[in-house]
Amino acid sequence: MNRDRWWRLQTRAAPYLFVSPFLVIFCVFMLYPLSRSLVLSFEKTIGPRHSAFVGLSNYRYLLGHDRLFGLALLNTAAYTVAFLALQIPMSLGLALLLNSRRILFRDLFRFSFFSSYLVGQVFVGVIFFQLFGPDGLINHAVSIVAGHRVVIPWLSSPNLVLPSVLIASLWLATGYGMVYFLAALQSVDPELYEAAEMDGAGNWQRFVHITLPGIRPMLGYVVLVGAIGGFQLFELPFVLLQGAGPNARGLTVVMYLFVMGFNTGDLGYASAIGWMLVVILLALTFIKFRFFRFGPESGN
């Protein structure tokens, strides 16, 4: 093989050689597991070695007869709605506050609020398991305010399970949303605020007519990411509640998938739950792009 031919062969093969590591990793760790789980969702399995094809039976039972899945879906949806309703205003409020030049040590406060997100859900679950305990710091603080010993059953009362998970989640994720809103706020043209102030616009008017339109794309993104994260919730309640909590009020869709797949051994039914979750997340994504399109093409 002459030198020119060898060079042409290297030139043609080089792109494929550079891409091949990604393709191998993608096929082994993404494409094959996804396709295998899709096949499993049409099977009844007893552990990883015994399975029988059942068609759509897993999906029919999941949608029509499985009360635990309905409860998990209800718990997850309620948590997600409450989380977004609180996290978005809190994150945006912090971003507006820490975007002001009047605040001293802004960088320190930004890092402090964001640093909680770096520890992870498992660690937060362990921390708040101690805080919410009968003799934990939160009950101790309430007792000091009340003037007598107060024991609030944060983790043992069915009505307080989701609020407990919600409080821990907000402590974890509020700073995360704040960082995105800060980036969006800093991209808004300051001259718009100056012009509005010269025209006599107040703080609320500037917020509604300048700030909100300027951060709408980021707002839609944070809502979508928060909704997807809410429906994927697993580690935090699993560690905090030591399972699904009283009356399964802390059961989430992903937790139910874990229980069916690894505790009962029915990997086929667990795969059906996983693909149903995929459909839900795709629907949320479609709703976001359909009803929250912000940009020149949306007319906003």
Image (cartoon, grey):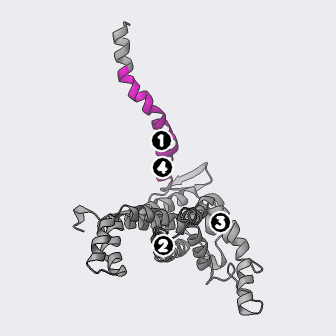
Instruction: Report the front residue among 87 and 153.
Output: 87
Mark 1 vs mark 3: in front: 3
Q: Tell me where the magenta segment starts and ends, as one range.
A: 11-40
Mark 4 vs mark 3: in front: 3
Q: For label 3, count other residues whose C-alpha is less than 10 Å away and answer few (under 14), some (14-19) or many (20+).
A: many
Which numbered dot is residue 108? none
> Label 2: which residue?
97
Give the main secondary structure, helix, strand or loop, of the magenta stretch.
Answer: helix
Q: Secondary structure at mark 2?
A: helix
Q: Secondary structure at mark 1?
A: helix
**Residue at image location 59% in from the left, 71% down from the top:** 171
Q: Is residue 12 magenta?
A: yes
Instruction: State how far apart marks 4 and 3 are (Cα).
Output: 30 Å
Instruction: Report the front residue among 145 and 35.
Output: 145
Q: From the top left corner, tell me how far across and down residue 27 is, in percent.
A: 47, 40
Which comes before the other along the chain, label 4 or label 1? 1
Q: Is residue 99 left or right of residue 254?
A: left
Which numbered dot is residue 34? 4
- Amino acid at the residue labelled 2: Leu
| Quarter residue 287 falls in | bottom left
- Amino acid at the residue labelled 1: Phe
> Label 3: which residue?
124
Q: From the top left corner, tell me how far across and down residue 67 is, in percent.
A: 53, 75
Which numbered dot is residue 26? 1
Mark 4 vs mark 1: in front: 1
